[in-house]
């Protein structure tokens, strides 16, 4: 491989990782907006958030990291010998980065006061749109995925079912688990509400919408 080819390859990798990290930060902001809305955070974050309300052993981001470890183990079990361990290592590092970015994002919007149900609902919808955009950008980066999304992709690959449908299934599962934790330890729904249910269906659908928009724009340029 020529030196120019090597340089082009490294530039492409750097560009892809920068795109991925941008998507990572945007996704963390989506989670922060959903949390701020107070109508239930995004499904994938609902379990860590509910646990953080019950136990102060770890921060919200810390419990999110622990969930990521469980998702990585699940991914390895599903793919078995076909697992890319280099990608798993990268996922592990990025998962912990995401946990800290989530704490940072929550801190960045801490001063915003959300008053009234209408404003809560708008913040919840905004959180869904931002989170879906972050996930979509990560997918377009094409270098790595967060453990939760990579687990969905692995199951989609093994079962032959669409990625978006797998995501919706697990989003609903997270909501159910979060609701059980809330009722068992807090006696009420906390961290999971109607916003979580809406997000479970909305985020996957919004990702599909971003894909359609992207394809329309790309096809329009190719004409």
Image: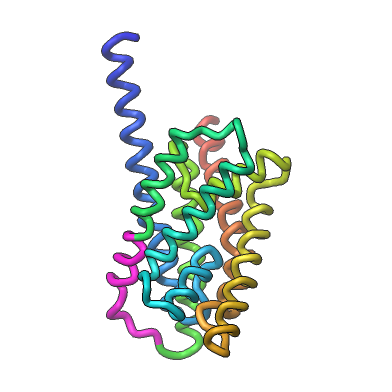
- The residue sitting at the front extreme is 57
Q: Is residue 66 left or right of residue 212?
A: left
Which residue is rendered at x = 64% and y = 47% of the image? 163
In the rendering, at what x and y percent does residue 93 appear?
A: 36, 46
Residue 212 visible, this angle: no
| Residue nearer the viewer, 159 or 164 | 159
Secondary structure predominantly adopted by residues drawn in magenta: helix
Q: How many marks can you see? A: 0
Q: Is residue 91 left or right of residue 174?
A: left
The colour style of the image is rainbow
In the rendering, at what x and y percent does residue 85 appear?
A: 48, 34
| Residue nearer the viewer, 103 or 4 | 103
In magenta segment, residue 54: no
In the rendering, at what x and y percent does residue 189 appear?
A: 57, 84
In the rendering, at what x and y percent does residue 13 appear?
A: 35, 31
Which residue is rendered at x = 32% and y = 60% of the image? 100
| Residue nearer the viewer, 211 or 110 | 110
Which residue is rendered at x = 36% and y = 54% of the image? 96
Quarter of the image with the N terminus is top left
Which residue is rendered at x = 28% and y = 20% of the image? 7
Magenta-colored span: 100-114
Quarter of the image with the C terminus is top right
- Establish if 45 lies above or below 87: below
Picture quadrant where residue 82 is located: top right
In magenta segment, residue 107: yes
- The residue sitting at the top extreme is 2
Residue 89 visible, this angle: yes
């Amino acid at each position: 491989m020529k030196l120019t080819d090597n340089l082009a390859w490294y530039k492409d990798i750097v560009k892809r990782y920068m795109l991925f990290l941008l998507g990572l930060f945007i996704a963390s902001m989506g989670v922060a907006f959903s949390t701020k809305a107070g109508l239930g955070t995004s499904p994938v974050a609902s379990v860590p958030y509910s646990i953080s309300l019950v136990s102060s052993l770890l921060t919200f981001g810390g419990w999110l990291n622990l969930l990521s470890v469980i998702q990585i183990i699940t991914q390895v079990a599903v793919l078995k010998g076909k697992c890319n361990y280099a990608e798993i290592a990268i996922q592990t590092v990025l998962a912990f980065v995401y946990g800290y970015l989530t704490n940072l994002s929550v801190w960045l919007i801490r001063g915003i006061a959300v008053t009234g149900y209408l404003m809560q609902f708008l913040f919840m919808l905004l959180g869904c749109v931002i989170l879906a955009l972050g996930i979509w950008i990560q997918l377009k980066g094409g270098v790595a995925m967060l453990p939760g999304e990579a687990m969905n992709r692995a199951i989609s690959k093994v079962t032959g079912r669409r990625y978006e449908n797998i995501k919706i299934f697990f989003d609903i599962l997270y909501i159910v688990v979060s609701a059980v934790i809330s009722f068992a330890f807090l006696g009420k729904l906390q961290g999971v509400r109607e916003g979580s249910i809406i997000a479970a269906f909305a985020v996957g659908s919004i990702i599909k919408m971003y894909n359609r928009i992207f394809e329309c724009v790309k096809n329009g340029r190719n004409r």
